[in-house]
Image (cartoon, rainbow, N blue to C red):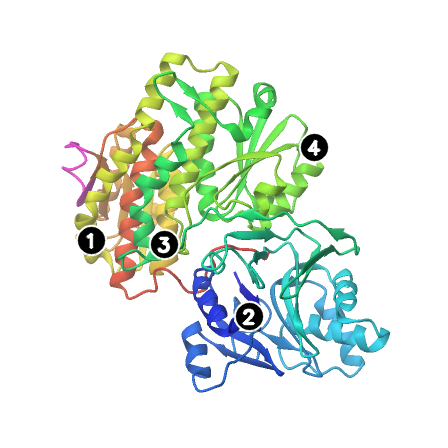
């Protein structure tokens, strides 16, 4: 969602801030702005892209060694210059940038308006900086204490940075429910929503915890909690390389990340499977071996693509570990009164580790006594720090808003968890594990082979790029792959697409099929192969256009489908890891041919850190 960058030190702040905002563009946004302090506090902001902001300030003197910048994803107030961040206090001496939502801003705004405060935007953020100003004026407190008092009065989520014209050697940063990281340099500090703007300058970072406030000077850093107790910061070293944040010769980050999947899956498996021994080793959850042996139920909570990965995990865990599994949308789970006991295991899946609904669902499950595992990509994110244990996916930074390698990495981890639980509960023989793990170890190579379909997929994309609707069908663990394929297409090409279990087509979607409807069917060799063939015949009888994902060498589906994309043969358990590749490529090429912004699709954000 919104992106935050701050700098205080000995260098010119603007180049660092603007480069940082470009690094954060992947988060999704509709406007951008900067604030700089050099004798006086100056604010520049513009609706549109960071490039538009750069054009707006190109003839302005942008000196100053302290400053901050922001990319806004609209929540309160439409995208516009006046609703862009930073926002200033009434006396123009204070300015703020903010990621999150202040839920009780309406009540606070009414009170402040009655006192004579005048607001220039529709945002909740402007209300917060006016509240801080009002506290200073009414109580005589200094800025540091006024910020702490104000944050005790607001309800909601926030990551904020505040500057003051009267404090040229101070940035104040705070977080609750939204991510915030501080980069530690020599005589300088960096602040950002995530580590991507920081890695170029320092490897040493501090992840702020909820309800912490950082008072950042050029040479010193003080962190307190909202109750005014001093906190000891934990400095971590980033495991992130600058080249990971570049396109590396590809036209788009999404295409690069699709082609990175052989490596990302290999990294996910490395050191965790021993095919010859028939053994899975997951150090992140080994302390909970006894829990896994006795768990009654597993609940998987996630959103979006991660939810689709969770559905694949449900098939695998129930099939091999023989434990009942439920897969829940975190956004729905948190707003009802779910029945959870101490015998339950909750697995929370999130690429960023900062998804607001998933975080809230974790807290709810913890309150009810469940054990919580996290499946996350970003080291040091909030979810890994909140859960009892977990497994990192090791996919590397994913910059494209539409998840690709994150999905296959999550499915890979869930596959490992399924076999690990089966191993601990004695539900699988060692000889079978040898067989399955040997096959799983080959998946990176099979993904490389699947990527060779790119040119053929491009031809199919050219045929269907002007379609207005598309159906995706699959059975068993290929049903979540159908959902994911439909999501990718709608996310980046803006074509309406829906995924269904193939057998459910007769219960409604079949009414949509005509001679203009493309239907993508995952028809690989599996236990439901004959049933899928029947579904394809039903589509063809209604003149639908069938694009079939089939196992290499298939002849039966090839004889009836309009277009066939072959993928390497693998065990049925691992088909989702291979079958998703051509669907990612299909969505990508259709979007490019339609002239869409593949890496930054409209209205979307990479990490949904607000409700």
In the rendered image, which residue does mark 1 sit on?
458
Mark 2 or mark 3, earlier in chain: 2
Q: Nearer the viewer, mark 2 or mark 3?
A: 2
Which secondary structure lies at badge 4? loop
Q: Is residue 558 magenta?
A: yes
Residue 394 in percent (x, y) is at 43, 40
C-beta proximity under 8 Å, tags 3 and 4: no
Report the residue at 22% width, 45% height from top: 546
Which secondary structure lies at badge 2? loop
The answer for how far apart the CA atoms under marks 1 and 4 are is: 50 Å
Which secondary structure lies at badge 3? helix
Instruction: Looking at the picture, tell me which residue is in the foreground, 280 or 555.
Output: 280
The crowding category of the residue bearing disc 3, from other C-alpha atoms within 10 Å (few below 14, some 14 to 19, many at least 20), is few
Mark 3 or mark 4, earlier in chain: 3
Report the residue at 44% width, 67% height from top: 19
The answer for how far apart the CA atoms under marks 3 and 4 are is: 42 Å
Mark 1 or mark 4, earlier in chain: 4
C-beta proximity under 8 Å, tags 1 and 3: no
In the rendered image, which residue does mark 3 sit on?
243
Location of the C terminus by quadrant is bottom right
The answer for how far apart the CA atoms under marks 1 and 3 are is: 28 Å
Q: In the rendered structure, find residue 369 and report the number of the disc placed on it.
A: 4
Mark 2 or mark 1, earlier in chain: 2
The answer to which quarter of the image holds residue 346 is top right
Q: Does residue 122 appear anywhere in the picture?
A: yes
In the rendered image, which residue does mark 2 sit on?
10
Q: In the rendered structure, find residue 522 and report the number of the disc placed on it.
A: none
The stretch of residues the image draws in magenta is 552-565
Instruction: Looking at the picture, tell me which residue is in the foreground, 367 or 551.
Output: 367
Residue 209 in percent (x, y) is at 65, 51
User: From the viewer's perspective, is 556 left or right of 223?
Assistant: left
Instruction: Looking at the picture, tell me which residue is in the foreground, 345 or 70.
Output: 70
């Amino acid at each position: 969602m919104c992106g935050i960058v701050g700098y205080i030190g000995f260098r010119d702040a603007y180049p660092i801030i603007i480069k940082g905002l470009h690094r954060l563009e992947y988060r999704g946004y509709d406007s951008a702005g900067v604030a700089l302090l050099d004798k006086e506090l100056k604010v520049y902001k513009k609706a549109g892209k960071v490039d538009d902001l750069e054009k707006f300030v190109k003839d302005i003197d942008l000196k100053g060694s302290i400053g901050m910048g922001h990319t806004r994803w609209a929540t309160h107030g439409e995208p516009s210059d006046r609703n862009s961040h930073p926002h200033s206090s009434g006396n123009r001496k204070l300015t703020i940038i903010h990621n999150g939502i202040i839920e009780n801003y309406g009540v606070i705004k009414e009170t402040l308006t009655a006192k004579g405060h005048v607001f220039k935007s529709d945002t909740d953020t402007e209300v917060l900086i006016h509240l801080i100003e009002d506290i200073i004026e009414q109580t005589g407190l200094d800025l540091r204490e006024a910020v702490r008092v104000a944050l005790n009065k607001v309800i909601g989520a926030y990551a904020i940075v505040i500057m003051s014209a009267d404090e040229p050697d101070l940035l104040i940063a705070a977080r609750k429910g939204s991510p915030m990281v501080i980069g530690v340099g020599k005589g300088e500090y960096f602040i950002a929503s995530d580590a991507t703007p920081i890695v170029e300058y320092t490897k040493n970072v501090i992840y702020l915890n909820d309800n912490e406030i950082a008072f950042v000077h050029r040479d010193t850093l003080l962190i307190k909690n909202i109750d005014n107790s001093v906190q000891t910061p934990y400095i971590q070293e980033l495991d992130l390389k600058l080249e990971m944040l570049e396109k590396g010769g590809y036209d788009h980050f999404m295409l690069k990340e699709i082609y990175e999947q052989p490596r990302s899956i290999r990294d996910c498996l490395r050191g965790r499977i021993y095919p010859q021994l028939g053994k899975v080793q997951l150090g992140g959850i080994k302390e909970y071996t006894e829990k896994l042996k006795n768990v009654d139920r597993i609940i998987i909570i996630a959103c979006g693509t991660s939810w689709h990965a969770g559905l694949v995990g449900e098939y695998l865990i129930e099939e091999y570990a023989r434990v009942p599994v439920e897969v829940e949308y975190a956004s729905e789970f948190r707003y009802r009164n779910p029945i959870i006991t101490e015998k339950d295991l909750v697995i929370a899946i999130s690429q960023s580790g900062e998804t607001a609904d998933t975080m809230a669902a974790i807290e709810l499950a913890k309150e009810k006594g469940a054990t919580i595992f996290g499946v996350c990509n970003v080291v040091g994110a909030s979810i890994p720090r909140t859960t009892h244990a977990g497994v990192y996916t090791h996919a590397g930074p994913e910059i494209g808003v539409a998840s690709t390698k994150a999905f296959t990495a999550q499915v890979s981890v869930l596959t490992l968890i399924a076999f690990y639980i089966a191993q601990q509960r004695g539900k699988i023989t060692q000889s079978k594990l040898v067989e399955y793990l040997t096959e799983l170890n080959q998946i990176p190579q099979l993904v490389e082979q699947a990527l060779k379909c790119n040119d053929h997929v491009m031809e199919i994309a050219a045929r269907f790029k002007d379609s207005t609707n598309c159906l995706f069908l699959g059975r068993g663990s290929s049903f979540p792959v159908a959902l994911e394929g439909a999501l990718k297409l709608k996310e980046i090409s803006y074509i309406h697409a829906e995924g269904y279990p193939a057998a459910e087509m007769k219960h409604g979607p079949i009414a949509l099929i005509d001679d203009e409807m493309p239907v993508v069917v995952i028809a690989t060799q599996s236990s439901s192969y004959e049933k899928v063939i029947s579904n394809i015949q039903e589509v063809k009888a209604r003149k639908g256009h069938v694009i079939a994902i089939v196992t290499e060498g298939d002849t039966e589906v090839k004889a009836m489908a309009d277009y066939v994309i072959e993928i390497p043969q693998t065990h049925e358990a691992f088909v989702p890891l291979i079958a998703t590749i051509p669907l990612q490529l299909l969505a990508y090429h259709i979007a490019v041919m339609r002239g869409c912004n593949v890496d930054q699709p409209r209205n979307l954000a990479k990490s949904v850190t607000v409700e």
